[in-house]
Amino acid sequence: MKTTLRNALIALLTFSSSAFAAGATGAGEGSLLVSLFLGFFALIIVFQLVPATLMMVGILRGLFGRDREAIKVKS
């Protein structure tokens, strides 16, 4: 069991050494499509925040508004 585990570990380290060596070759490069993709989802989030903010303002106005009237019950 120990030899199998040791051999598997050696094989894993041997075959993955080139992957570790090439870790930062493409770091920082982004294409136009990546920028458009991220910008599209940023716009979705912004467009969801606008109605949520308006709703929150309406709720706060309703809770803390000055012109509260007493509810009259018709009998």
Image (tube, rainbow, N blue to C red):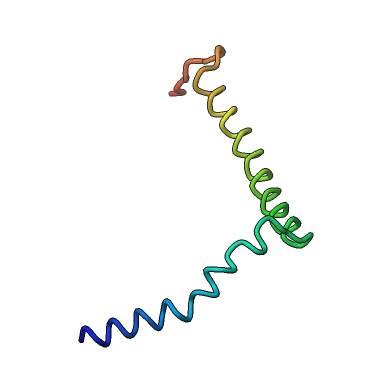
4 on left or right of 25: left
**In the foreground, 10 or 64:** 10
Q: Indicate the quadrant containing the C terminus: top left, top right, bottom left or bottom right.
A: top left
Q: Where is residue 27 in the image (x, y as percent from the top left)?
A: 65, 58
Q: Which residue is drawn at 55% across and 12% down?
A: 66
How many discs appear? Answer: 0
Q: In this view, does 73 lie above or below 5?
A: above
Q: In this view, does 50 lie above or below 38?
A: above
**In the foreground, 39 or 74:** 39
Q: Position of residue 45 (x, y in %)?
A: 64, 47
Q: Residue at x 76, y 57 (%)?
A: 36
**In the foreground, 17 or 31:** 17
66 on left or right of 50: left
Q: Residue at x 54, y 73 (%)?
A: 19
Q: Position of residue 9 (x, y in %)?
A: 35, 79
Q: Indicate the quadrant containing the N terminus: top left, top right, bottom left or bottom right.
A: bottom left
Residue 30's quadrant in the figure?
bottom right
Q: Which residue is drawn at 29% across and 81% down?
A: 6
Q: Residue furthest top?
A: 66
**In the foreground, 50 or 19:** 19
Q: Which residue lies furthest to the right in this view?
A: 32
Residue 62's quadrant in the figure?
top right
32 on left or right of 17: right
Q: Position of residue 65 (x, y in %)?
A: 55, 16
